[in-house]
């Protein structure tokens, strides 16, 4: 009889033992913030994101806050002060880790050392190296214990970065292929963690390919392509997420991890629109306003007005006409990805112009044959209006930035 009761007690207790190994974690993620610390239009601003993080932390034991890179470049306050204010403000949001993106190189690779000094959270990248082969990040990866869960976080950046950054100040740097780097790092870190996250500034399509190719990753928190991934993409055993750009959305992931089996047992993800975030955190907003005040007299000046909202597609031929006129060439080429915002109906300020073209690129003329020019246009999309008029063997001179 005693044995029967003992067996019954064991059977009753068994589910509770099993449940004791399952722990919950909330992951908040952003990407491609590009200096938009101030709430404006559909962009949340750092103070509202900080308020959201504080709200989530107040109601959950395990919270991890991640950024997938390109924190800087895209607003006057970022460019004029070479990115420093952005990391000062993001410190107040409460990030646990961030990836290095290609735009962190806009002021030269040595500036990343300054960002690392300012940031009170580690900047990660396993595949970005300086001229002497030294790692440019704080570390390639991080193991952080959150609510009893050992979380591994691996930083990655696209190896196409040299083709997208200014060569000035970036001489001699190199980038290992993300796929090989990730595979090797996963093999090293997976036995030591319960949950494995790739914090990736590679782009959504490439990140899905990483998920297909590299086993052992639970979640890829992505960036670079400015993709609104809603709902999260499930590729094999890996969830791939990304939260658009500029703080238009904040990602929220709710996961359950079995710390005995060292695996994720439940996943749920969503994007929270800026309009649905809580009111700004006053302390963070005060710091944001202090920084923005330093540039307001220069950029918050009305210079024109429009009765129409101009999209990137509509602005491209206008900007190309300006390039052609400035270089006295037959036409201009302005890549669609370089048009970073829209002109909204109403007053146009110097800030609006800056937000559309924030990078200070150089104006150059290029001479090439039609076949090569077609390839350039095709990279920008088949919709480019000049594509149909090009003849392969003819030579063309055009202005571009």
Image (cartoon, rainbow, N blue to C red):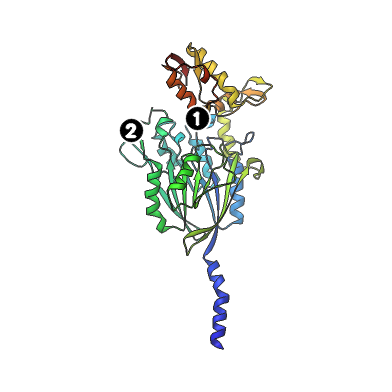
Would you place residue 127 above or below residue 339 in this image?
below
Q: Depth check: 42 or 267 in front?
A: 267
Residue 228, numbered circle: none
- Whether residue 337 is visible, yes or no, is yes
Outermost bottom residue: 1
29 versus 10 height, above or below: above
Residue 172, numbered label: 2
Please tell me whether residue 190 is drawn above or below residue 347 in the rendered image: below
Q: Which residue is mark 1?
A: 79
Q: Earlier in the sequence, mark 1 or mark 2?
A: 1
Gap in angstroms between the C-alphas marked 1 and 2: 24 Å
Q: Quadrant of residue 256?
A: bottom right
Q: Secondary structure at mark 1?
A: helix
From the image, which quarter does the N terminus lie in? bottom right
375 over 97 or under it: above or below: above
Identify the residue at the far top of this view.
328
């Amino acid at each position: 009889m005693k044995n029967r009761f003992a067996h019954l007690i064991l059977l009753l207790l068994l589910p509770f033992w099993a449940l004791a190994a399952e722990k919950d974690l909330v992951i908040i993620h952003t990407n491609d913030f590009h200096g938009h610390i101030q709430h404006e239009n559909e962009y949340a601003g750092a103070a509202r994101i900080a308020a959201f993080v504080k709200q989530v932390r107040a109601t959950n034991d395990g919270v991890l806050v991640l950024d997938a890179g390109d924190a800087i470049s895209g607003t006057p306050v970022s460019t004029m002060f070479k990115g420093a204010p952005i990391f000062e403000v993001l410190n107040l949001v409460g990030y646990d880790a961030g990836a290095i993106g290609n735009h962190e190189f806009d002021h030269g690779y040595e500036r990343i050392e300054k960002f690392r000094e300012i940031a009170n959270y580690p900047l990660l990248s396993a595949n970005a190296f300086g001229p002497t082969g030294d790692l440019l990040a704080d570390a390639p990866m991080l193991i952080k214990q959150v609510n009893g869960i050992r979380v591994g976080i691996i930083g990655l950046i696209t190896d196409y970065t040299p083709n997208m950054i200014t060569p000035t100040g970036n001489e001699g740097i190199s980038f290992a292929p993300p796929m090989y780097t990730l595979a090797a790092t996963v093999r090293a870190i997976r036995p030591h963690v319960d949950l494995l996250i790739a914090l990736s500034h590679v782009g959504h399509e490439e990140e899905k390919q990483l998920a297909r190719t590299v086993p052992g990753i639970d979640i890829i928190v992505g960036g670079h392509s400015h993709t609104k991934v809603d709902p999260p993409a499930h590729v094999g055993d890996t969830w791939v997420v990304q939260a658009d750009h500029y703080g238009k959305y904040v990602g929220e992931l709710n996961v359950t991890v079995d710390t005995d089996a060292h695996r994720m047992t439940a996943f749920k993800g969503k994007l929270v629109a800026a309009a649905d975030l809580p009111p700004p955190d006053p302390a963070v907003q005060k710091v944001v306003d202090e920084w923005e005040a330093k540039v307001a007299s220069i950029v918050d000046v009305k210079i024109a007005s429009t009765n129409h909202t101009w999209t990137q597609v509509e602005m491209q031929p206008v900007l190309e006409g300006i390039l052609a006129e400035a270089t006295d060439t037959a036409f201009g080429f302005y890549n669609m990805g370089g048009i970073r915002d829209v002109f909204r109906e109403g007053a146009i300020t110097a800030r609006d112009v800056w937000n559309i073209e924030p990078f200070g690129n150089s104006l150059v003329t290029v001479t090439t044959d039609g076949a090569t020019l077609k390839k350039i246009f095709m990279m920008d999309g088949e919709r480019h209006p000049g594509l149909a008029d090009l003849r392969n063997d003819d030579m063309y001179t055009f202005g571009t930035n």
